[in-house]
Image (cartoon, helix red, strand yellow):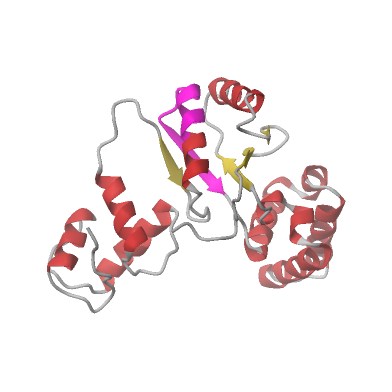
Amino acid sequence: MIRQMIRRGSSGPAVRGLQASLAIQVDGIFGPSTEAAVRSFQARAGLGVDGIVGPMTWQAIDDDATPRPAGEPRLDYRPNARKLDPRAEAILLGIARGAGLDVLTVTSTYRKPEDQVRAMYHNIERYGTDYNFDLYGPSGDEVVSAFKGAKAAGGSEDEIKAAMVARLLAVGPTKVSRHAGIPGLAVVDLSPPSDRTGIESALRQAQAAGIVSQWIGPPSDPAYHVEIPILGLDPTAPVS
């Protein structure tokens, strides 16, 4: 069924249905509170956050409302993680089943330059420059050095990030991070579960089967970094 696109200022039955699905006050008026609820849902679902309810958001709402079979895992996208191609999602769900997990938390996927710098800035602030020099190769080290230099010069957070973005673009984003959009490759970071035995066993099996090309995890990386080869994939393209 094709549903109408609705946004702030819309009213009527479609808005009432949306509000009921989001478990908010049902008054049939798409006002500020409804828009805020939509934006919050879109962030949780890994969609583009614009407050407009179009085909992708309607589908995500329907999927969220569909009961999962007992024991069927799900993916939980963090706000900064872009929604993955369905083929990559299916592989991750298979890994979750093999690991005996109910939920896999996706913390990062494709990153624009600003997103990559935000992630690196956070990691440097949390773990220090020495850890991040070990984490990245020579090109990534240049971006870490840009952080170090701008920080030593007394730069603000925005100024430090601007210096890092400039250096990232100069050396080439894909030379710094595989999250930067390599054709044919879905790159995913997963939050480590409390018991890592199951997920590491499932990842080893997936790699042996050729479903996953490579992965690394703690302590080498704060998250489980997983690379999934998918023929013809453009990781920079929004999922429709």
Is 220 placed above or below 117 here?
A: above
Among the 4 quarters of the image, the one containing residue 202: top right
Left or right of 211? Residue 90 is left
The picture places residue 136, in percent across and down from the top left corner, at: 79, 47
User: Which residue ends up furthest to the front in the rendered image?
Assistant: 232
The picture places residue 16, in percent across and down from the top left corner, at: 14, 64
Q: Is residue 103 magenta?
A: yes
Q: Is residue 159 magenta?
A: no
Q: Quadrant of the N terminus?
A: bottom left
User: Which residue ends up furthest to the right in the rendered image?
Assistant: 138
Among the 4 quarters of the image, the one containing residue 156: bottom right
The picture places residue 41, in percent across and down from the top left corner, at: 35, 56
In this orientation, which residue lies closer to the viewer: 1 or 200? 1
The residue positioned 54% from the left and 46% from the top of the image is 107
Residue interval drawn in magenta = 93-108
The residue positioned 42% from the left and 57% from the top of the image is 43
Is 28 placed above or below 207 here?
A: below
The picture places residue 84, in percent across and down from the top left corner, at: 50, 49
The number of numbered discs placed on residues in the rendered structure image is 0
Q: Quadrant of the C terminus?
A: bottom left
The residue positioned 21% from the left and 76% from the top of the image is 10
Left or right of 68? Residue 219 is right
User: Which residue ends up furthest to the bottom in the rendered image?
Assistant: 9
In this orientation, which residue lies closer to the viewer: 125 or 83? 83
Is 216 placed above or below 149 here?
A: above
